[in-house]
Amino acid sequence: GQQVMQIPQYQHVQEGEDFTTYCNSSTTLSNIQWYKQRPGGHPVFLIQLVKSGEVKKQKRLTFQFGEAKKNSSLHITATQTTDVGTYFCAGPGQNFVFGPGTRLSVLP
Amino acid sequence: DAMVIQNPRYQVTQFGKPVTLSCSQTLNHNVMYWYQQKSSQAPKLLFHYYDKDFNNEADTPDNFQSRRPNTSFCFLDIRSPGLGDAAMYLCATSGSGTSGMYEQYFGPGTRLTVT
């Protein structure tokens, strides 16, 4: 079945440093979504990428969809303590699958 | 504000005692999902409704059932909860269109404890 993998599993950064999480799917995705879940909270939708090679920006966040539509990345520039949480990629397929997530902690 | 509401927020049940979790939405979305999320893990899709069409994930145990009496409400029934069913249960909704399903809006979740 479809598998979605993410690396790293954990990332600890100093406030102001950059952060990147990578998502890889075993199958081609029609689109990919990114969610953020704060500690104790529920997943919140960030963005959806649809086109091959697509790049979208939201303030300090940059999202990219691979040319083959099997991988994606989320990059945060100059992290802040408000960026703390777990970032999940998720893709549709035979079933909707969340990646295992990357837990980001930001040290002030 | 339009939203996804889950009740109760915390539920304690006894081993083997049936329990029902509820979800309601004011977004008028046609797709509703139930996820199970265990500590430090990703949400795992149990099933979803596309309008009235029920879609069960292949590995969802028979112990889990769902009902959607109308667009706004969806219920998760756990017929005989085991200790391994203790988890956060998340309800989500989304719209849909020709390009597939859209972003999902999650409720705050119901944390289930099995004693």
Image (cartoon, coloured by chain):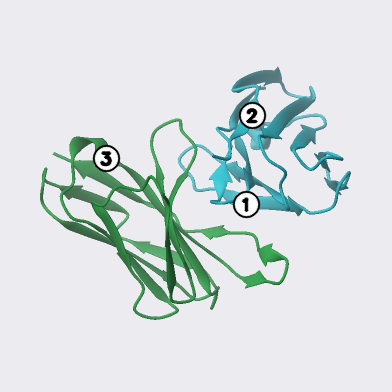
Chain colours: A cyan, B green
Query: Which quarter of the rendered picture does the N terminus of chain B lie within?
Result: bottom right
Q: Residue at x 46, y 60 (%)?
A: B33
Q: Kindly indicate whether the residue at mark 1 contacts the one at mark 2 (C-beta within 8 angstroms).
A: no
Task: Please indicate whether residue B12 sits to the left or right of residue B57 in the image.
Answer: left
Whole-number angstrom distance, CA of label 2 to CA of label 1: 16 Å
* Figure check: B65 above or below A9: below
Are tags 3 and 1 found on a single chain? no
Task: Please indicate whether residue A100 sits to the left or right of residue B52 in the image.
Answer: right
* Figure check: A76 above or below A58: above
Q: Residue at x 23, y 51 (%)?
A: B63
Are tags 2 and 3 found on a single chain? no
Check disc 3 and report the residue beneath it: B86
Helix, strand or loop at disc 3?
loop
- Residue, far bottom: B70
Q: Kindly indicate whether the residue at mark 1 contacts the one at mark 3 (C-beta within 8 angstroms).
A: no
Q: Amino acid at mark 2?
A: Gln
